[in-house]
Image: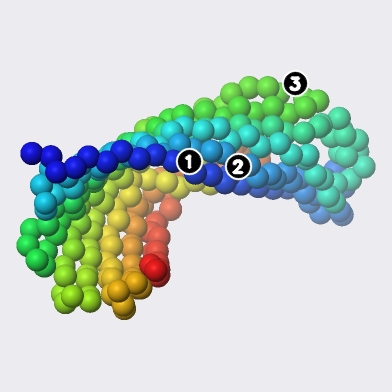
Amino acid sequence: MTNWLSIGGGVGLTLGALSEQARVNNLDPTLGDGRLKYSDTDFAVQGNIGVMIEPSDNTRIGLRYLTETDLNFESRIYLSGVDPVIADLLKGIGNVDLSTKMPQSLMAGIFHQLNDQWAVLGSVGWDDWSRFSSIHVKVDGTGIDTVRDADFDDTWHVGVGAQYQYTPKWMFTAGFSYDSAAVSDSKRPIELPVAAMYRYALGFKYLKSEKVTLGAGLSFLWEGDVDVKPVGNPVRGEVSGQYDNLFITFLSLYVQW
């Protein structure tokens, strides 16, 4: 028998930032390399809808859906250190416009209290990253107006965790999660070495008073050896290979009042 059902929703702001720089080979070698740069930021609104159900006093099940939204970037192209001949060739180029989509996602989680000290948690999720990889590119004055596809795949998530109430004031937490790769080895761009992710985490919560809780967490995200798609050509040079032992470490601290 269901004790209670809760449905909620809201909106949140997503901040996107674009910054791209490139070298320009000057015809006069004494000038060195010139620079090309464009950058912009954009805000978008995403809807967040959640459902929480408590089938028993010890169990809670939640479902959350995050809507898709658009990010649109527009920037002038800035040149510096470019010789006059190349500057004249590029003077007709106007703004660069890039637009993409922040993906929708769906996440489900469960919490179950085993006894006064132990609780277990689980989660599964899906992210629509294949939509993020479709990027509309337009450059004024060049005739470029096309959609580029980075061939991203949707990703799946699964995670498990546990909580241990050591004393009334101290709680320790641990967990593991797996996220599938958003892009395959043969298509992975060298500037975005994202592969399957294995995350291991430890943390604690300390009840300092009836109103204040302190906490911290340490997460280790392991991707391993990550192959990248070869890029370049025999004239400009070619790059291929892999990132070895790729990992990221996160440390978080928080206060709840």
Are the two marked residues, 3 and 2, in contact with CB atoms closer than 8 angstroms?
Answer: no
Q: On the rendered image, what quadrant is the N terminus found in? A: top left
Mark 3 against mark 2, which lies toward the viewer?
Answer: 2
- Colouring: rainbow
Residue denoted by label 1: 11
User: Which kind of residue does numbered mark 1 sit on?
Assistant: Val
User: Which mark is first along the chain, 2 or 3?
Assistant: 2
Residue 181 location in percent, x, y? 35, 41
Helix, strand or loop under label 2: strand
Residue at (85, 46) in percent of width and height:
82
- The one of 142 and 64 positioned closer to us in this rendering: 64
Residue 152 seen in the figure: no
User: Which mark is first along the chain, 1 or 3?
Assistant: 1
Query: How many angstroms separate mark 2 from mark 1 (CA)?
Result: 13 Å
Residue 215 location in percent, x, y? 34, 71
- The one of 233 and 19 positioned closer to us in this rendering: 19
Image mark for residue 43: 2
Query: How many angstroms separate mark 3 from mark 2 (CA)?
Result: 27 Å
- The one of 81 and 205 positioned closer to us in this rendering: 205
Q: How crowded is mark 2: few (under 14 residues within 10 Å), some or many (20 or more)?
A: some
Residue at (53, 44) in percent of width and height:
13
Residue at (31, 78) in percent of width and height:
208
Helix, strand or loop under label 1: strand
Write down the quadrant of residue 71 in the picture.
Answer: top right
Residue denoted by label 3: 143
Residue 202 location in percent, x, y? 27, 66
